[in-house]
Image: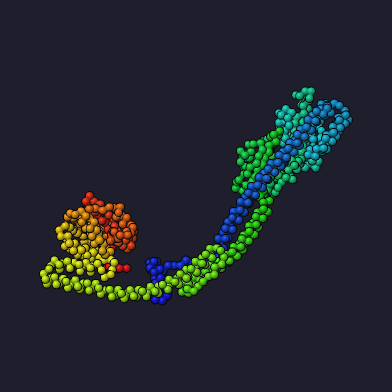
Amino acid sequence: MSNYVILYHIRMNEKKNTGGLCVRSKRFFSLQYKVLLFSCAIIIIPVIVLGIISFIKSSQILQEKVALSNMNTVKQIGNNIEFIVKNIGDTSLYLIQNEDVRDFLKLRGTEPKEIISKKKIKIETDMMQLMASKTFVDSIYIKGFNSFELNTTGVRNIIDDETIEKAAGLRGGTMWYLNKVINYNDKSTNVFSMIRIVNDISNVSNKLAILKIDMQENAFYNIYKDKIIGKNDDFFIINEAGIIVSATNPGKIGQKFNYKDYGGRSFDASEGYFEYLSTGKDCLVTYYTIDSLGWKVLNIVPTKELLKENMATQGAILAAMLISFSICLVLAILFSKKILRRIKLLNKMMVKLEHEDFEVFIEPKGNDEVTLLSRSFNKMAAKLKELIQKVYSVQLKQREAELRALQAQINPHFLYNTLDNIYWMGRMEKAFETCTLVEALSKLFRLSLNSGNEITTVRSEIEHVKNYIVIQQARYRNMINFTLDIDPEVLDCVTLKLVLQPLIENSIVHGIEQKGETGQIDIVIKHEYENLIFIVSDNGYGVDLDEIRKLLNESSSNNKGLAIKNVNDRIKLYFGENYGLEFFNRKSGTTVIVIQPFSRGSVDND
């Protein structure tokens, strides 16, 4: 038989295993492509995760540092504002306690104008010298209730009656408010003013004048203008009434600040910072309360502004990711080419082997799994070559065996013809009982051979058993009674041949003979739950169930129980492990149940 024929049989078997269907091949992906894809995945994922974590962590650290820096800045601004406010308050106290100022405010107007003018010039000169060291003070204005005024500049100061009443209600305390002064060219200028009532020291209930010290509107702005980080960075100075007295955006000065826009409860503490997250308003809020005034200094910085400095870090991380990915990708390509070159060679040799070139050989190089695979391939090729040679010799022996089988077929025909001659001679000699036995034996042999087929029908198996019973009844006379209960539905079902005869023989030899009394053997064949059931029961001696199970599962050295085991093994071999023999003990005797699949059809030995 040629190599082609052998490969043909192998492929036919593969086709049978797939049910004769054409299996659709999957799309081919080279191993190099998979290695590169996997390498890219294991490179990209850690690099991206590391980059994201680094960026988030650096952003958090930067934001934390900016928050602490802003907190210190806001505190410093608050301290500077407190210093200015306190300095202005001290200036007001100095003027209140100044004897020349008090005397001037106590004048009644009856003094000569020269004396009044001289005193006014002297006091205003002292006031201007006092202002010279205080750059944040714009002007000082004192309006006496005796109709005399002191003014350090030429601007006009207007104090409405409502403001005077509020100041008087403070009983000498200070009040800050937004105000306007009119210049010499009749243009108004916004100022931030401190106002207080000047009382007579010797008689506190005697009100002498209204004292007003003006600051330029941008005086507080000049304190924090150098602290602004970006275009959208906002500073607010808010007084105890919640009015904005200074802001980065001048248009907001004089408006009431709404703390609820940034989470009102977050300002409950005297100082702190928090991140306020809202649609279009993600920002870092830092605040500080000037305890002596009750004012708050606020700094609001958008989160985007904070992370601008982190863009450089982000760019460096991105560059490192790209460089790392490029280097790793080059190394992966080189590695895959070096390793896969040997695998491609192995695949090439496999193709040659598939085309019946059994002289292939791969030189093993290296010390890895590919080397082991190459060595195994060489061994496989050599073994396959050896097996092919053995197949040739086996095929020759098979041909010889087929010839012997043809010769051996003569023997059964010779036996049938001989038994037939004995049968007719017995009839001629009127030995009818002998004729019956010879006929039963002849049919028994013929049914046992079954033309070489392993599969038969229930009908043929019953006929075989009946002939066997005829022979056994002749042997044991009236010692054994047989009954047959056959469901007509199962007569055309297929079954393994020679199933019942070994079981009946086992009941006779190991059951009834050992008991030594007249026995009964009942045979039932029926269809139950998609199964073909044979039941053989006897009232004999009984069996050791543990020994029977051991005989069915293990081979015995003395051939004990070989026939029973042979029946069980053949059933399991043909139909599967769910089928076979089951033994049960009754009160008297043994029952054997044979389970096979219920199937009708023609006898097919395949």
Left or right of 89? Residue 406 is left
> Residue at horizontal 74%, vertical 40%?
220
Q: Position of residue 263 (x, y in %)?
A: 61, 41
> Residue at horizontal 70%, vertical 43%?
69
Who is closer to the viewer here, 402 or 313? 402
Who is closer to the viewer here, 48 or 311? 48
Q: Position of residue 217 (x, y in %)?
A: 75, 41
Q: Position of residue 271 (x, y in %)?
A: 66, 38
> Residue at horizontal 21%, vertical 60%?
486
User: Where does the N terminus fall, quadrant-wise?
Assistant: bottom left
Examine the image and state in which quarter residue 559 appears: bottom left
Q: Which residue sits furthest right?
A: 114
Left or right of 498? Residue 347 is right
Left or right of 369? Residue 203 is right
Examine the image and state in which quarter residue 221 appears: top right
17, above or below 80, in the image? below
481, above or below 392, in the image? above
**Does the image show residue 244?**
no
317, above or below 103, in the image? below
**Does the image show residue 198?**
yes
Who is closer to the viewer here, 234 or 377? 377
